[in-house]
């Protein structure tokens, strides 16, 4: 079920991204970009990244798109202009983009089995350490400041019937969801990644000041306009 | 088994690159950049999940922060540019290009380097790029030797030979 949902979201994202690149009307293109971001947020949710999904929806599909729409409507007439209807060098750009995607996908497909082997080699050791799924209580979020969510612990499955394996895989899934809660992400952000978060906050502040300064009208220009009118 | 999300990350980056290269609307160019960032952070989250680590999610949050900063700065720049030219067309901002390399038609397949003398001669006679900027100091067009081809320009090379 989850896999099918992931496939569906991925298909929606890719199709709408193509539409974004090809649609001529800028407002429609911006809307399809918003839908791409929503589909990506669905994929985040399926990957147990609830906070990233929510903040992506708020920041991208909310703030960014709306403000871009404002500027688009502020600067653009209703009819389509020459620079929207005519693409520059579509063939060369398409070749470059397809080559890039093919290269990256080929590398991922080639290296993925190795990565899986490495991860598989790591996890049995961890599984041996903790034979049971440890469900942390809310209180000890602080206690387990080790950001590496505790290693995947598989239940020792003595019976190999289909029903039980299904159950244990469901257990593994829910255990994974337990280990990637928003509370633990917050604990990680404010312990191991504290410096990064502080720098990000400073960056936001600087960008805000910069944006205000750049967009400001110069007082001289204002005075000139007033004398004109 | 490989997650499909790992494969659409590169696809989103490629589509964003295509959009950035082909679009001429400044705002849609910036949206294409955002699409590339979204593809990258998708892959970060999936890989982080595979490694059982919060690093991927944290990094995608940082990418989100950078994207928000970029959007704020880009918008204020676009607003300033639109005030000056009244259009979102990125071609309205090609004033700094080498204007004499404009037309590729009728070159007979010769490269720009071979055509330098001809182009330089044309540049020396062509003053159209000064139109509308009469009050600004004029510089010699790039690629010309100002002493062998004096151009109507306010910039004068210091007389090094005489001083030595």
Image: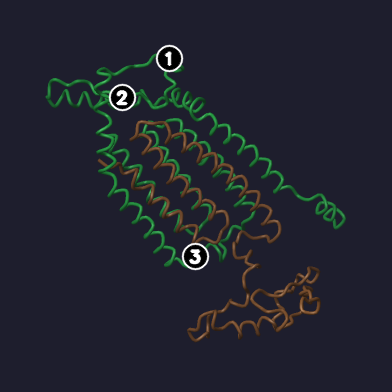
The residue that label 3 is drawn on is: A87
Mark 1 or mark 2, which is nearer to you? 1
> Of callouts 1 and 2, which one flags the residue occurring earlier in the amino acid sequence?
1
> Of callouts 2 and 3, which one flags the residue occurring earlier in the amino acid sequence?
3
On the picture, is B138 further left or further right than A196?
Answer: right
Secondary structure at numbered mark 2: helix
Disc on res. A140: 1
Secondary structure at numbered mark 3: loop
Identify which residue, A14 or A109, lies in the foreground: A109
Q: Quadrant of residue A128?
A: top left
- Chain B, colour shown: brown
Disc on res. A70: none
Asked if B130 appears above or below A149 in the picture, the reply is: below
Q: Quadrant of the N terminus of chain A?
A: top left
Secondary structure at numbered mark 1: helix
Chain under numbered label 3:
A
> Of callouts 3 and 1, which one flags the residue occurring earlier in the amino acid sequence?
3
What x and y, as percent, mark residue B147? 73, 81
The residue that label 2 is drawn on is: A174
Are the residues under marks 2 and 3 on the same chain? Answer: yes
Are the residues under marks 3 and 1 on the same chain? Answer: yes
What x and y, as percent, mark residue B56? 42, 36
> Dot 1: few (<14), some (14–19), or many (≥20) neighbours within 10 Å?
few
């Amino acid at each position: 079920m989850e896999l099918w949902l992931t496939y569906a979201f991925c298909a929606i994202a890719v199709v709408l991204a193509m539409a974004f690149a090809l649609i001529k009307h800028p407002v429609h293109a911006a809307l399809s970009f918003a839908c791409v971001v929503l589909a990506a947020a669905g994929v985040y949710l399926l990957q147990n990244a609830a906070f990233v999904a929510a903040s992506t929806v708020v920041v991208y599909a909310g703030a960014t798109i709306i403000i871009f729409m404002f500027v688009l409507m502020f600067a653009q007439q209703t009819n389509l202009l020459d620079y929207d209807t005519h693409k520059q060098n579509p063939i060369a750009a398409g070749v470059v983009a397809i080559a890039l995607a093919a290269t990256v996908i080929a590398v991922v497909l080639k290296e993925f089995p190795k990565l899986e082997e490495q991860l598989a080699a790591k996890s049995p050791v961890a599984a041996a350490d903790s034979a049971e799924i440890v469900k942390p209580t809310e209180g000890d979020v602080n206690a387990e400041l080790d950001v590496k969510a505790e290693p995947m612990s598989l239940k020792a499955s003595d019976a190999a019937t289909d029903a039980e394996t299904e159950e244990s895989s469901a257990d593994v899934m829910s255990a994974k969801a337990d280990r990637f809660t928003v509370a633990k992400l917050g604990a990680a952000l404010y312990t191991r990644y504290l410096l990064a978060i502080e720098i990000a906050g400073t960056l936001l502040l600087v960008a805000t000041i910069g944006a205000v300064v750049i967009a400001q009208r110069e007082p001289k220009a204002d005075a000139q306009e007033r004398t004109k009118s | 088994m490989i997650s499909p999300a790992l494969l659409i990350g590169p696809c989103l980056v490629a589509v964003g690159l295509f959009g950035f290269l082909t679009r001429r609307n400044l705002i849609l160019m910036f949206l294409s950049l955002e699409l590339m960032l979204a593809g990258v952070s998708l892959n970060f989250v999936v890989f982080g999940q595979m490694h059982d680590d919060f690093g991927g999610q944290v990094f995608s949050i940082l990418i989100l922060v950078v994207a928000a900063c970029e959007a704020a700065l880009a918008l204020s720049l676009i607003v300033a540019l639109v005030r000056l030219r009244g259009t979102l067309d990125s071609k309205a901002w090609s004033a700094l290009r080498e204007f004499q390399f404009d037309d590729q038609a009728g070159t007979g397949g010769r490269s720009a380097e071979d055509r330098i003398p001809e182009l330089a001669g044309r540049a020396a006679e062509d003053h159209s790029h000064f139109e509308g900027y009469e009050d600004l100091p004029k510089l010699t067009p790039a690629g010309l030797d100002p002493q062998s081809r004096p151009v109507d320009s306010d910039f004068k090379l210091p007389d090094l030979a005489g001083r030595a």
